Image (tube, coloured by chain):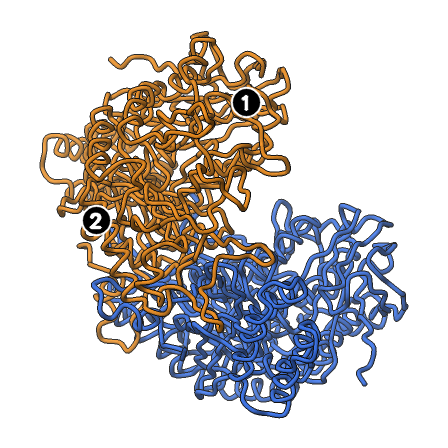
Chain colours: A orange, B blue
Amino acid sequence: MAAVDGPTAQAQSTTEKTEFAPKIGRIPIRFLAPQQPEGRWPAKAFAGEAVPFSATIFREGHDLIGGTLVLTSPTGTVTRHRMTPGAPGTDSWHTTALVDTPGAWTYRVEAYTDDWATWLHNAEIKVPAGIDVDVMLAIGRELLARLGTSPTVTDAVATLDDTTLTPVRRLAAVDDPRLAALVAETPLASLTTLSEERPLRVERSRAGLGSWYEFFPRSEGAKKRKDGTWVSGTFRTAAKRLPAVAAMGFDVLYLPPIHPIGRSFRKGPNNTLVAAPGDPGSPWAIGSAEGGHDAIHPELGTVKDFSFFLSAARKNGLEVAIDLALQCSPDHPWVTEHPEWFTTLPDGSIAYAENPPKKYQDIYPINFDNDPEGLRAEILRIVEYWIGVGVTIFRVDNPHTKPLQFWEWLLGVVNTRHPEVVFLAEAFTRPAMMQSLAGVGFQQSYTYFAWRNTKVELEEYLVEVSKETSATFRPNFFVNTPDILTEYLQFGGRPAYKVRAAIAATGSPSWGVYAGYELFESVARPGSEENIDNEKYEFKARDFAGAEAAGDSLAPYLTRLNEIRAQHPALRQLRNLDVHWSDDDSILVYSKYLAPQFTGTGEADGIIVVANVDPHSVRETTVHLDPTRFGFERGAEFTVTDLITQSTFVWGGDNYVRLDAFTEPVHILRVEYPKGP
Amino acid sequence: MAAVDGPTAQAQSTTEKTEFAPKIGRIPIRFLAPQQPEGRWPAKAFAGEAVPFSATIFREGHDLIGGTLVLTSPTGTVTRHRMTPGAPGTDSWHTTALVDTPGAWTYRVEAYTDDWATWLHNAEIKVPAGIDVDVMLAIGRELLARLGTSPTVTDAVATLDDTTLTPVRRLAAVDDPRLAALVAETPLASLTTLSEERPLRVERSRAGLGSWYEFFPRSEGAKKRKDGTWVSGTFRTAAKRLPAVAAMGFDVLYLPPIHPIGRSFRKGPNNTLVAAPGDPGSPWAIGSAEGGHDAIHPELGTVKDFSFFLSAARKNGLEVAIDLALQCSPDHPWVTEHPEWFTTLPDGSIAYAENPPKKYQDIYPINFDNDPEGLRAEILRIVEYWIGVGVTIFRVDNPHTKPLQFWEWLLGVVNTRHPEVVFLAEAFTRPAMMQSLAGVGFQQSYTYFAWRNTKVELEEYLVEVSKETSATFRPNFFVNTPDILTEYLQFGGRPAYKVRAAIAATGSPSWGVYAGYELFESVARPGSEENIDNEKYEFKARDFAGAEAAGDSLAPYLTRLNEIRAQHPALRQLRNLDVHWSDDDSILVYSKYLAPQFTGTGEADGIIVVANVDPHSVRETTVHLDPTRFGFERGAEFTVTDLITQSTFVWGGDNYVRLDAFTEPVHILRVEYPKGP
């Protein structure tokens, strides 16, 4: 029976004369994955991902079935991928396919009764038992006839027909590996049913994969004068730091807002309400007489300087992300030109940002409802202006304080015109908003990672981001930011910095570091979760080279992490993470695996991470692995090499581990696969 | 801002001039419930259900929001139900609404910014703190203006305007309960957004609510002759048993197939392959020279006799369910008239049912793919024939061995023409098929209940059926069937029979008993999970009255259970079950609660069930209740009355319980509510 098209069409052959058209196909196919929850927006992937696809397929009775993923690329190329059954009783079927080019992909699942497998199953029980022998052999011959007339088939028919043989010998005709290959290639299918079509939006690899570094350009090359005031760094001086960032293996450089900074109510050091004349102010208080969101802070340079910086970054293999912070200082040109873009109070004043009783008088939030069309046009103009200058990544500040509908519109328009542009959502809020921002189009998102520090928290979160939300939400595991210096880092000592970096770099294909992490900056403004003397409000000149020379820098470790990521395609995937068990409450274990057909080298790639997440301890325990999760049979022995220490171990299902937080708190183990033939 | 219609239309006001239309509304509304998974078929409810509705609603920033369920009845009557927020951080909003009439209901959720609540929250912080006092009071006056000019409003405005008062006193103007009532009635809403519309299919109450009893009419009044052969019971003799069944409080009587039984390969006692001349055969081997699925077994009587039986049942308050078993004995008229409705093998024979190496030669399965149109028409004709005779419930035998697509079609057509008809799916198979049969339209389903016997199993299963699957799947908790005599019943003794009946009758609005349960019939055919001397293959004359007179019958207990169900509307609901904790591994605790507005009496109804599921033990433990689940404040004390023993206890959060399986293994406790004013 030929495949028929679409969920309603499925039923057409049998219902066209009736008043009621079933929505289910002849062979039920349900719960296609990946999908975003509700199916409201397309499932997401990034180029180079090996995407797990699945569906629930079942039929009445005892006949055996098969399933095939039918995947259509943006150019219309159709590939077919045989599915295999999942856990018994689940009726779930699975396959994994590489999506290699960005664009609008679609997929369907085809299900069918496997006539050959059904017959073979029955014949192999009945013929030896002497039940219905002639009928079973006759059915076998009918099925062989559907396979054509190749020598493989005619040989089998001849044996099946040879009445001089015993029935069991005649049936043995089908034990031919060539025949098995033939029916594997072209199943003898009937009742073939095609599911509805589902969309899969594939974006460029940077949408899901990258090592981010954040610095304030004004700090890079900033110099303190003798009178205590500062000379700001510029794009030209900051460019000098690019080779060092690139040498650590980072490939995205994120800059806080580069626009003119307001003077009204400018914040002083440590978020104080009064700024001294030389205080530079928060880059997020955008807009002054020098311009707004389409201008560059004069102290950083000109557009030409910024273009020079972009070009220098590019030469160093670094893509630059700028900040899109949709808020204004009271000095922003919009305040006078477009008061309708703000909220005017009954006394004629413009409402500042507040969370009563706290008020933030250096910031006017935008009102998106007075003139949505005008505002959208202006913001789109600004974004496209920077795209024109050469920016391809926007880190969006606090998107959860602007309407979700606005983001769906803006990202929809921008990505239609500029599909290469990547938006990172800096939202730290409740799950509904976090997931919905990702749902409407943000390519990646800041996460709760910073606050997931215990073994159980990390196990649950790694599974959540790699499995449960992976069709919607792409995590970027920042270990710190100018806003986030967690208690774990404040009080965990240097081991904590290693642990968090190692888990971020191996647990997610996108991770990020804010400058100063490599210097173990761990002192917080008392009672807060931010660095003291926060760079948001002042210049910061750091002696990276000096620290490294003194052996006081984490830069070599960060460099090694990025090297390992570069060498191991399994670490550049989101969905391939599996958690394993250890007997210790603080020893976290997970593996990432990529099968040979997806690595590009033809060889499997597997990494096992074993981390002691208690940074104050030495721990010994047993780690229990399921080797089927990284390409071996259950019970296999294999060699692993620690990519930090270069130690080698022979491991199996149960393995002794000792992790000393004060030396190396994390094993990053390469699984050694036997070389292919 | 006026409500705008539909998910795309929502965005219209702001996007009509742009190239990209967002799918999300101004205030995001997601995850409407109830819905079937995938939303492929409408969510289900039955008339009289108090249905919990929910949605995820959130917005950017700090403004407070509100949500309203907008429910449309089949006649177009629209009711609005204020929603309340769920657990912090979930952004879920909830309400419960009664669906009182069968038909196609729809619902939407409306979300809005609650301007009044937002202002009040801010004003009550800022005004006492002396921040922005004039502006806050001015905003308050603007909001009051939107409330109209009633005395309540003008009083408040006057106080708010009275500059002789302190700001705090002026603000106190809004502490008027009349004002609170006014804004509760008509919220001061802005950015009002309406979700997409979702369907809710409400069926008559019998679709989800009933106490079922099963007997074989041929056994009721059957008499053994002196030679050991039997005189079959008939519809006329079976009708004499109806008052006793009704007296036990059952309201549905289910009859195994009433059609002529095949003679070829007829099964003998205990499923033996050879029947003696007097053996009646299995009623599920349908069809003989006397007719097929539209005929009545001559030994039971005529259509006239059956109509008499239906009428007698009706007079006793019993609705009759007949069996729709789509399979044929080799003697069925279809075998010669429509061989295309079966599978013909290469040797010209018709394939019997088999699960190799087992074969069932008394049964020919139907092939639904050779002539689907013809077969559908004939089966529809048969179903409508019995509907014409007066049958309104069909218990469908093994629906999981026929195409799901066929059932979607059949039930779709039948329920379009006869919305009152109820189909019960007798499928014991994997979850995907079980749920999908319910999904395509089966009004109710047999369940895994028989095999859920431990406390943990029951807790999980009660939550699954009452919550997780309740939009799709309506359970009918049969305690036994002619096919199912579980080990729990075989070896649990008489206490097991009480435990299982009490849980079935209180845990699900539909439950069922197969005749003999009240006689504690517990002997299985060795190695099987069926009664020995199974009634499927022989006559069975039971002395119900004698057993009851001797005190050897569970009938009084079953009667009491059905009385309790009749008196307690909370037990006639599916979705209102909550599990509570006990310290003992075998003491199961759950409550069912119905709020005063849904009971019909204006009084709350609450039942707490505490069951010792270890039928060989006396157990003492502490039961920990969450009284908020049945209408009290946390920490409340209340009186409960055991409806089995009439004992009364004063209970609270933590309660000592002693349950002796050998006397009364189950407390069924009525919660005593203080009488209203």
Instruction: Same chain for labels 2 and 1? Say yes or no.
Output: yes
Give how far across and how far down residue A372 sits, in percent: 32, 66
Protein chain holding label 2 = A
Does A474 appear above or below A669? below
The nearer-to-camera label among 2 and 1 is 2
- Determine the secondary structure under disc 1: strand
- Determine the secondary structure under disc 2: helix
Residue nearest the viewer, comparing B334 with B205: B205
Disc tally is 2
Residue nearest the viewer, comparing B662 with A573: A573
Protein chain holding label 1 = A
Q: Quadrant of residue B562?
A: bottom right
Q: Amino acid at mark 2?
A: Tyr
The residue located at (79%, 47%) in the rendering is B583
Give how far across and how far down residue A360 sits, in percent: 51, 53
B519 left or right of A668 in image: right
Q: Amino acid at mark 1?
A: His
Does the image show residue B671? yes
The residue located at (71%, 55%) in the rendering is B522
Q: On the rendered image, what quadrant is the C terminus of chain B found in? A: bottom right
Does A485 appear above or below A146? above
Mark 1, other Cα within 10 Å: few <14 / some 14–19 / many ≥20: some
* Marks 2 and 1 in Cβ contact (< 8 Å): no
> What residue does disc 2 label?
A385
Q: Quadrant of residue B643?
A: bottom right
> What residue does disc 1 label?
A624
Determine the CA span between mark 2 and mark 1.
54 Å
Mark 2, other Cα within 10 Å: few <14 / some 14–19 / many ≥20: some
User: What label sits on residue B613 in the rendered view?
Assistant: none
Give how far across and how far down residue A202 sits, in percent: 25, 44
